[in-house]
Image (tube, helix red, strand yellow):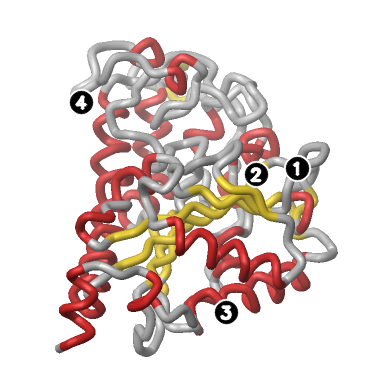
Amino acid sequence: MIRDPRWWSTVAPKTRIARNKRGMARTGQTDQRMSDVHLAALYADPFRILRPTRQSVPFVFASPHSGSLYPASFVARSKLSPIALRRSEDAYVDELFCGAVALGAPMIAARFPRAFLDVNRAPDEIDISMFDGEVGVDVDAPSSRVAAGLGVIPRIVRDGAEIYRGKLAAAEAEERLGKLYHPYHRALGGLVEETRAQFGIAIVIDCHSMPSAAAAPDIVLGDRYGASSTPALTRHADACFQLQGFRIVRNTPYAGGYTTLLHGRRERDVHALQIEINRTLYLDEDRILRGPDFELVHARLTAALTEFLAIEWRQLLRSPAITRFAAE
């Protein structure tokens, strides 16, 4: 199973006083970050890749929001408690879906938390008002997500609470993108290309969880309304999860994020499907701990994935490329 060091091992005091050469107290965020071994560990090793003994299916699984290694300097600069920071985390989703590895599919999982950096956003979705100067990266016109505080470097956690006490150093935008964001997507893209080279096709399954709500479904399948994946694949996933008793909705309210947009290229025989699972099924949302039904839900998901990955994909996902591959 994938599991990062527990978040509470990274918690730093809310105030950390450093001393300069003249003995004067200061609270420099640069000093905090330079001495943060957890931040250094993330930058050195931002994700985990689990590989099967032999990849036997054209699927690649991704868990971009289950990272639980919180840099001490990040926690120290936040207004929020460690539990509040974890509200944005898709906690334990990597564990829920890791059964896919034994079924022959590789899996990538981010170690960094979503509240620190969100790889399911475009790299230019940046709120420049969060920084103390001009950022050294391309910035797009503000989107609705950026305006809401949910850009690639989030300003708020998922329940709307502001994360930071003050502005971030301008250099942090380029640093987080360069050391976390781009390496993650390069690695995912590499898995996709390896898979496509082997099978003639690649299918990205982007795994997430959603906050519980009244009358919410158990699972939402998002294929960007057919743009990121052939509808036949989505229908097949729908049927496999329903066989395990899950209540399924397609594309509402989650049709797919930046990962499905970036990697879902049907014209190149790369499909991408987002799966959102309701947290009330498996998680104690107040304490961010595995709920009493965690193992049962894991078993049901693994059973659904067993059926899903057994798909006769050459027939279901017909394309000229697949036809050529099948004939070779």
Q: Position of residue 78 (x, y in %)?
A: 56, 26
Q: Quickly name the residue at label 1.
A: 216
- For discs 4 and 2, the disc positioned in front in the rendered view: 2
Select label 3 or label 2 by which is in front: 3
1 and 2 marks in contact (CB < 8 Å): yes
Give the secondary structure at mark 1. loop
Look at the numbered disc 4 and give the secondary structure of its residue.
loop
Going by the numbered disc 4, the residue's amino acid type is: Val
Q: Amino acid at mark 1?
A: Ala
Task: Return the residue nearer the eye: 175 or 312.
Answer: 312
For residue 311, side relative to residue 94 (left or right): left
- Mark 2 packing: few (<14 Cα in 10 Å), some, or many (20+)? many
- Please state which amino acid type lies under the numbered disc 3: Glu
**Rendered image: mark on residue 307:** 3
Residue 137, numbered label: 4
Above or below for 188 versus 195: above
Earlier residue among tags 4 and 2: 4
Answer whether labels 4 and 2 touch (C-beta < 8 Å): no
Q: Nearer the N terminus, badge 1 or badge 3?
A: 1
